[in-house]
Amino acid sequence: MKKHKILRIAFLMFIIVCFSVVCIMFFMSRETSYRPNTDHIPIIGYHNLAKDEDKNKYWRFDPWTASLSSFEKQMKYLHDHGYQTISLDELYAWKHKKKQFSNKTVVITFDDSYYSTSLLAEPILKKYGFQAATFVIGYSIPKQIQTYDAAKKQHIPITLLKDTKTMKYYSHFYHLHRKIDNEYAINTYTVKELQKDIQSAGEAVSTDYVAYPFGKYNDNVQKALYQESVKMAFSYNQFRSMKRSDPIYELPRYSVNAYTPMFVFQYMINH
């Protein structure tokens, strides 16, 4: 009798789990119906890209290096389902109610200014008529053009950090993408030191918009951003899109990495 009861409970739990999975998949995969005005915009963030053969050879276990084929698949999905991309200037105007966009609007960003962003991502973005923003680590900018090496995480050289119709470059701070005595550098700087870091970053790229190193921020850095007239700052928040009501220095992004399945990507842009 006890055995039958356990089996009934197990079967019921199995049915509940299956039903939940089906509901979640349906909810995630359904296509968003077009609406002329939106009250939220998803911002997606990438890091490094690699051709599929290089991903398998050099970066198989690196979550921050996505395959080129997965990136193209995601961009094709956006294109085929009627999505548009907007610039950070347009996002800023939308936040301040100076522009309206449909709910099929996405912002694409890249962190760390890897060479692959310029060599691999930009041609695909251009192919689909999309635009994106790259956040540059000032300290890591090479002074000269290097030969691309897929086995290394190289950064875009200073001579190629020029805004185009497809790609705009902004700040990922100057020398805060590191730890000092096991603490994130951004948490150890004073307001004045943070201002100086922002100013140094501004010698190479615009600091109108910034992305926090490792997604970390605090009161001091927000004070420094205000003092340096930064318009918006981006972190990472895996659970929602940006809303107009979000604080300008605490804007969420979805992180798209090597392990992001297509149905999760669809969830990000549809909700």
Image: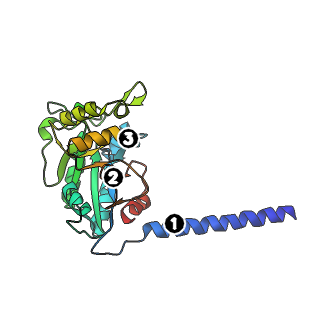
Of the two numbered discs 1 and 2 on the same chain, state the one appearing first in sequence. 1
User: Seen in the image, is 195 located left or right of residue 252?
Assistant: left
With 235 as the anchor, is 195 left or right in this view?
left
Residue 30 percent location from the top left of the image? 42, 71
Vertical side of 217 occupied by 97: above or below: below
**Percent x, y for residue 158?**
14, 36
* Mark 1 lies on residue: 24
Q: Which corner quadrant of the image does residue 183 belong to?
A: top left
Depth check, mark 1 against mark 2: the one in front is 2
Callout 1, which amino acid?
Ile
Left or right of 71: which side holds 183?
A: right
Q: CA distance from mark 1 to mark 2?
A: 26 Å
Pointer 3 local density, CA inside 10 Å: few below 14, some 14–19, many at least 20: some
Q: What residue is shown at x 29% (from left), y 61% (from top)?
A: 106
Judged from the image, the secondary structure of the residue bearing numbered disc 1 is: helix
> Closer to the N terminus: mark 1 or mark 3?
1
Near mark 1 (Cα within 10 A), the count class, few <14, some 14-19 or many ≥20, is few
Above-or-below relation of 139 to 261: above
Instruction: Tell me the residue that label 3 is attached to.
Output: 216
**Is 101 located above or below residue 68 in the figure?**
below
Q: Residue at x 32, y 56 (%)?
A: 43
Residue at 43% over, 27% down:
182
Mark 2 residue type: Leu
Please determine whether, in this image, residue 35 is positioned above or below residue 153: below
Q: Which mark is residue 185?
A: none
Which numbered disc, 1 or 3, marks the residue closer to the eye? Answer: 3
Of marks 2 and 3, which one's residue comes earlier in the chain? 3
Answer yes or no: do the residues labelled 2 and 3 have beta carbons within 8 Å?
Answer: no
Q: In this orientation, which residue lies closer to the viewer: 56 or 14?
A: 14
Disc number at residue 251? 2
Q: Quadrant of residue 171?
A: top left
Is residue 116 at least partly visible in the picture? no
